[in-house]
Image (spheres, rainbow, N blue to C red):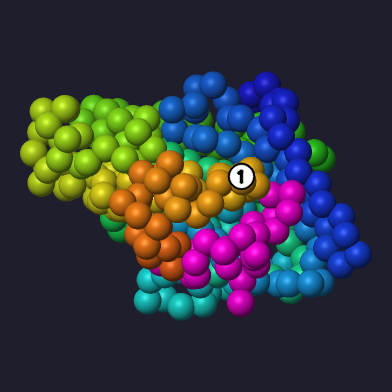
């Protein structure tokens, strides 16, 4: 078994109606290129039961250790009940999750290319979708949930997840260099560099880059760049910046404030001012409808 992880961040919140704890840690170093972070969580809420789950540049895997949760992804499947767990591909608008007021589990955040290699799937097959652990891993998905449910601490859970993912890594292929280089360039610029410029810098056509992105990331490089800019705005909102909305838009690479508002309407379901009001404290996410 891998060495037990040390926590990198712990979020705790307790109020009259709501409480939650989230413990984050890094994966085994051998997984660092494919896995961003782990989070063990538990919560009890009475003031809300529904969240808006924002689009991001990570593929989220949930192992559910509590009561079933309901998930509505942007695709045509509508609401589904998830008792064991699921993997959610990249999406171009917010999803919804709903609980009965209580939930617990482990979240594994994968890079898009990492998910492609570890899961062995074209990522456009997962885009806009939520796929159960049983569909992806068969009986092994059920065994993973059973093992995590029986673990005595979050550190033991993370070690078990390390072992599970390292087993997948043994069969993983190598990433395509053009995609990883393009991802690095887009992340480095915060989503502000034009896709045509990225393609020229790495020596391929826009069409080739878009095709490889759909396969290994799940969305186009243009959409990924928009999500990166959106995430920069969210980080400034969370930091309680004194900047005005127009200044934030300019700092994050938007043409103007109207373009930033357009992206927030698509990605968060409303303008930035509404998003700020819905944002929960202490890493709690975004209240849903």
Vertical order, 92 against 237 (above or below): below
Quadrant of the snapshot with the C terminus: bottom right
At horizontal 68% and vertical 21% (from top left) the residue drawn is: 3
Give how far across and how far down residue 67 sits, in percent.
72, 67
Residue where numbered disc 1 is placed:
241
Whether residue 218 appears in this view of the structure is: no
At horizontal 50% and vertical 70% (from top left) the residue drawn is: 270
Whether residue 197 appears in this view of the structure is: yes
Callout 1: SS = loop
Residue 109 or residue 16, whichever sits in front:
16
Give how far across and how far down residue 193 sits, in percent.
27, 37
At horizontal 10% and vertical 46% (from top left) the residue drawn is: 207
> Does the magenta-highlighted stretch encompass residue 16?
no
Quadrant of the snapshot with the N terminus: top right
Query: In the shown orientation, is residue 80 left or right of residue 195?
Result: right
At horizontal 43% and vertical 41% (from top left) the residue drawn is: 251
Query: In the shown orientation, is residue 281 left or right of residue 73?
Result: right
Residue 183 or residue 252, whichever sits in front:
252
Q: Magenta stretch? A: 266-289
């Amino acid at each position: 078994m891998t060495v037990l992880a040390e926590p990198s961040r712990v979020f705790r919140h307790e109020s009259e109606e709501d409480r939650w704890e989230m413990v984050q840690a890094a994966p085994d170093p051998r997984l660092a290129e494919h896995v961003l972070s782990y989070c063990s969580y538990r919560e009890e809420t009475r003031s809300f039961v529904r969240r808006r789950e924002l689009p991001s540049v990570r593929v989220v895997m949930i192992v559910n250790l509590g009561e079933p949760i309901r998930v509505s992804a942007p695709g045509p499947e509508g609401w589904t009940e998830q008792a064991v767990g699921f993997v959610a591909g990249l999406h171009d608008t917010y999803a919804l999750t709903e609980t009965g007021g209580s939930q617990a589990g482990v979240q594994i955040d994968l890079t898009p290319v990492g998910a492609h290699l570890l899961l062995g799937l074209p990522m456009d097959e997962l885009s806009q979708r939520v796929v159960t652990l049983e569909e992806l891993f068969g009986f092994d998905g059920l065994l993973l949930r059973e093992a995590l449910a029986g673990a005595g601490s979050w550190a033991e859970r993370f070690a078990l997840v390390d072992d599970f993912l390292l087993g997948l890594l043994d069969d993983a292929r190598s990433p395509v260099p053009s995609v990883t280089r393009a991802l690095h360039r887009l992340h480095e610029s915060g989503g502000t560099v034009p896709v045509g410029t990225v393609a020229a810098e790495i020596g391929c056509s826009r069409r080739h880059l878009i095709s490889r992105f759909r396969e290994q990331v799940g969305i186009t490089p243009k959409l990924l760049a928009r999500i990166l800019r959106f995430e920069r705005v969210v980080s400034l909102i969370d930091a309680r910046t004194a900047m005005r909305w127009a200044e934030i838009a300019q700092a994050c690479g938007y043409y103007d404030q109207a373009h930033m508002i357009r992206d927030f309407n698509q990605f968060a379901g409303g303008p930035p001012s509404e998003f700020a009001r819905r944002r929960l404290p202490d890493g709690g996410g975004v209240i849903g409808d």
